[in-house]
Amino acid sequence: MKHVIALDVGGTGIKAALVGADGALLHEARRPTGRDRGPDAVVAGILDFAAELQALGRERFGTAARAAGAAVPGIVDAAAGTAVYSANLGWRDLPLRDLLAARLGGIPVALGHDVRTGGVAEGRIGAGKGADRFLFVPLGTGIAGAIGIDGRIEEGAHGYAGEIGHIVVRPGPDGAACGCGGRGCLETLASASAVSRAWAAASGDAHADAADCARAVESGDPRARAVWQHAIDALADGLVIAVSLLDPRTLIIGGGLAEAGETLFAPLRAAVAERVTFRKLPHIVPAALGDAAGCLGAGLLAWDLLTTQTTTTQATTTHTTATHTTEVSP
């Protein structure tokens, strides 16, 4: 069976899969990233994991993987195949694409940013399927975004497109300090981490998290409702800025907070509608692929490489044939 290798590298865990030509997950596996052992050990673990998947695919399906795709966090230069920087994993200017290709016997390898790669999957086979313009926003430890335009994900001039988490929605010196160096960023107010911090403080339970807050909202706790609405208002402000700039047809919300279902989506849709004046309201929907989006997206990037190679080969063959025919014609 034709398949590719897919890797989704996170701060704490690596998700991996063998992905079929139709986007089907043929095999899934997970293991810790092991960042406590240092960046070199993380890279070694990624390469070992990929090699194990290659061997498993050959054994199970009788053929080797045709390509591989990897999604990684931080700053990524997809064209160069370089993981430029990751604060969580401790690497700089890591030529991960070349390292993977060498370990896997020279097969084509695609490298992508984790959120944009997840956006590829959500746009093609998930909640954005059929939408010509969408914005994918996962609400997790932080907040990022992937801008989908006619089947591709916009990377921007410098690879930073979609960083909605660092839109300033509460400007001024009283805004919460953000890890990016700014203040009042959306991420400091509406991420799952931000809600967890706010609910831990409001409830007096240092171990309480965003999921606990959502459950308390559903039970009618007024403190939880205040914390939740504070996050919803900030999120709506950030999303309306994005809607004004991008005019997406669909807003796809994923990540940990989206697991709250209509406890999140009902008030969020209302808050966005209140803020939109003359613009068209996008459809606001939950992500469909969950935490498999990154792996599926990495697999799709790998299949894209093969499609591109096939198209290029066919074009070269056609050109060569045409040239040869011209030369021998009387």
Image: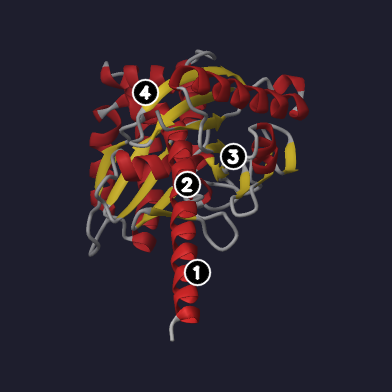
- Judging depth in this view, the residue of 51 and 194 nearest the camera is 51
Residue 325 against residue 23 in the figure, above or below = below
Q: Is residue 234 visible?
A: no
Quick one: quadrant of the N terminus?
top left
The tag earlier along the polypeptide, 2 or 3, is 3
Residue 3 against residue 55 in the figure, above or below = below
Q: Residue at x 44, y 22 (%)?
A: 61
Q: Position of residue 100 (x, y in %)?
A: 65, 36
Q: Mark 3 points at which residue?
A: 107
Q: Where is residue 273 in the image (x, y as percent from the top left)?
A: 23, 50
Residue furthest to the bottom in view is 330
The tag earlier along the polypeptide, 1 or 3, is 3
Q: Position of residue 151 (x, y in %)?
A: 35, 54
Q: Name the residue under label 4.
A: 224
Tag 1–tag 2 contact (CB < 8 Å): no
Q: Which residue is drawn at 75% across and 20% down?
A: 37
Q: Is mark 3 on a helix, strand or loop?
A: loop
